[in-house]
Image: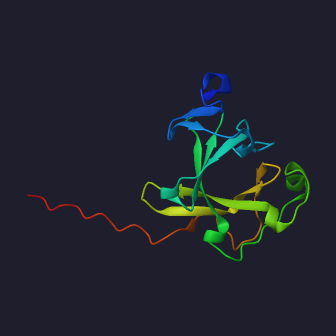
């Protein structure tokens, strides 16, 4: 895999990956998340490393293991909506390794930062991760209350152009 270095090349014995955004990152192999079907528009991307940095809590970066430049920014949906409800299809449940109780899953919303500076979360297609099985899917929800551009925070202030002199 591009960017991934075997444990034998690393004195600590842990595998690590060279990333475009975080430099060299060591990880425990059982911390990886597998997307059996990839992600929509990224079907070949099947392994991701969740990266949490205290200075960016509660954000989570999902770093691709095969593409050092690909990382998604995400946040747990309960940080946005406390009463968020997910409806998984049979196919998604199978991809996650079978059913589980609500407490066995992490549900993340991918975050987008528009060129205008507006920040939004995709509540319509969250990432669902089975914690123990380390398997995940992106689940498209049919609930019209969930938007793919749920605003996070106030809109950015309009830029003031300096006066001409």
- Of residues 61 and 144, the one drawn nearer to the viewer in this rendering: 61
Whether residue 52 can be seen here: yes
Return the x and y of residue 90 as percentages of the image width and height: 91, 57
List the single residue furthest toward the bottom.
Answer: 83
- Of residues 133 and 63, the one drawn nearer to the viewer in this rendering: 133
Return the x and y of residue 126 as percentages of the image width and height: 70, 59
**Picture quarter containing residue 13?**
top right
| Tally of numbered tags | 0
- Name the residue rendered at 78%, 61% in the picture: 105
- Name the residue rendered at 81%, 62% in the picture: 104
Quadrant (top left, top right, bottom left, bottom right) of the C terminus: bottom left
Relative height, residue 121 to residue 20 (above, below): below
**Picture quarter containing residue 65?**
top right
Relative height, residue 108 to residue 133 (above, below): below
- Of residues 76 and 141, the one drawn nearer to the viewer in this rendering: 76
- Name the residue rendered at 48%, 71% in the picture: 153
Return the x and y of residue 72 as percentages of the image width and height: 59, 48
For residue 99, side relative to residue 29 (left or right): right
- Name the residue rendered at 68%, 42% in the picture: 48
Return the x and y of residue 99 as percentages of the image width and height: 91, 59
Whether residue 6 can be seen here: no
List the single residue furthest toward the left.
Answer: 165
Q: How is the protein colored in the picture?
A: rainbow
List the single residue furthest toward the top.
Answer: 9
Quadrant (top left, top right, bottom left, bottom right) of the N terminus: top right
């Amino acid at each position: 895999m591009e960017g991934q270095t075997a444990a034998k090349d690393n004195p600590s014995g842990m595998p690590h990956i060279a990333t475009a955004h975080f430099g060299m990152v060591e990880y425990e192999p059982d911390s990886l998340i597998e997307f059996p079907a990839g992600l929509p528009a990224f079907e070949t991307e099947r392994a991701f490393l969740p990266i949490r940095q205290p200075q960016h809590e509660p954000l989570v970066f999902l770093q691709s293991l095969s593409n050092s430049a690909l990382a998604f920014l995400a946040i747990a949906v309960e940080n946005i909506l406390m009463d968020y409800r997910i409806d998984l299809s049979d196919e998604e449940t199978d991809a996650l390794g079978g059913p589980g109780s609500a407490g066995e899953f992490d549900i993340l919303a991918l975050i987008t930062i528009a060129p205008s500076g507006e920040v939004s979360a995709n509540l319509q297609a969250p990432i669902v991760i089975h914690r123990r099985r380390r398997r995940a899917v992106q689940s498209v929800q049919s609930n019209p209350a969930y938007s793919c551009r749920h605003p996070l925070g106030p809109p950015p202030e309009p830029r003031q152009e300096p006066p001409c002199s």
